[in-house]
């Protein structure tokens, strides 16, 4: 896969083995990805501060700050998703990677045939996580911006048995398609709900008198 879309994706490779870094950079470069390398966790943090990558591949065992410690730093201070590289093929290493929130796990020695499928699956998972975070940020911003949006999202959740993110996305997409602000659509939705409730009360009163 060698597309212009991939060329825009930046991958950070972190390992104290410079030969492995060269190999990984070459394989990913041929696949159309941009790469930046770091030989230590401290070096990686400096590279991330300069530009956040789309995905980081971290060696678990490194001198000084380990890959696990670097992963914790990334989780607490950045939005960078990461995969682990490890020379240990035991199940405990994989479980440890999962506990730290890794989107993938690669065993050394690595060959190109195994690298790309695992890497692309990890990158796809990283994109999913990034989208979920972005949706949550947009959702929280919208809910904080107006009471109407919050109430409208709750109304849609109850009426259509939807989760909060889905309700917000449907409301947002409708606002975009009608070229209106989301709080305006929310206000209209609440007004319509109030009218329906009033009409329902009217019908109920007439039925009782018959």
Image (cartoon, helix red, strand yellow):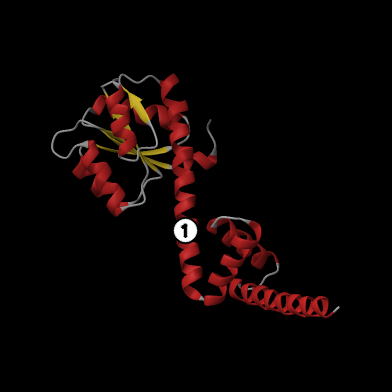
Q: Nearer the viewer, residue 58 or 51?
A: 58
Relative vertical location of residue 105 with respect to residue 196 in this rendering, above or below: above
Counting from the top left corner in percent of width and height, residue 9 is at 45, 43
Numbered marks: total: 1
Q: Position of residue 140 (x, y in %)?
A: 46, 65
Front in this rendered view, residue 47 or 62:
62
Quadrant (top left, top right, bottom left, bottom right) of the C terminus: bottom right
Q: Which residue carries the number 1 mark?
A: 136
Per the image, label 1 sits on a secondary structure element best described as helix
Q: Nearer the viewer, residue 25 or 159?
A: 159
Q: What residue is at 60 percent from the left and 71 percent from the top?
A: 182
Decide which of 52, 80 is in the foreground and name it.
80
Horizontal side of 50 relative to 111 (left or right) equals: left
Is 160 rendered above or below residue 58?
A: below
Residue at 28%, 20% (x, y): give it.
Answer: 90
Q: Residue 16 vs residue 56: left or right? A: left
């Amino acid at each position: 896969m060698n597309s212009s879309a991939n060329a825009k994706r930046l991958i950070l490779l972190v390992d104290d083995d410079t030969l492995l870094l060269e190999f990984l950079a070459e394989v990913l470069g041929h696949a159309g990805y941009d790469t930046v390398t770091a030989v230590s966790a401290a070096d990686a943090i400096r590279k991330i501060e300069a530009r956040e990558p789309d995905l980081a591949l971290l060696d678990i065992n490194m001198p000084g700050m380990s890959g696990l410690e670097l992963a914790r730093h990334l989780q607490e201070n950045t939005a960078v998703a990461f995969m682990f590289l490890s020379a240990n093929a035991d199940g405990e290493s994989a479980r440890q990677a999962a506990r730290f929130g890794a989107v993938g796990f690669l065993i050394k020695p690595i060959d190109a045939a195994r690298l790309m499928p695992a890497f692309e699956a990890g990158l796809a998972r990283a994109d999913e996580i990034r989208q979920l975070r972005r949706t949550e940020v947009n959702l929280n911003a919208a809910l904080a911006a107006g009471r109407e949006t919050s109430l409208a999202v709750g109304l849609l959740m109850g009426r259509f048995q939807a989760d909060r993110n889905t309700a917000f996305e449907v409301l947002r997409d409708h606002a975009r398609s009608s070229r209106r602000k989301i709080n305006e659509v929310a206000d209209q939705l609440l007004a319509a709900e109030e009218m329906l409730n009033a009409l329902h009360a009217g019908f109920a009163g007439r039925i009782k008198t018959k």
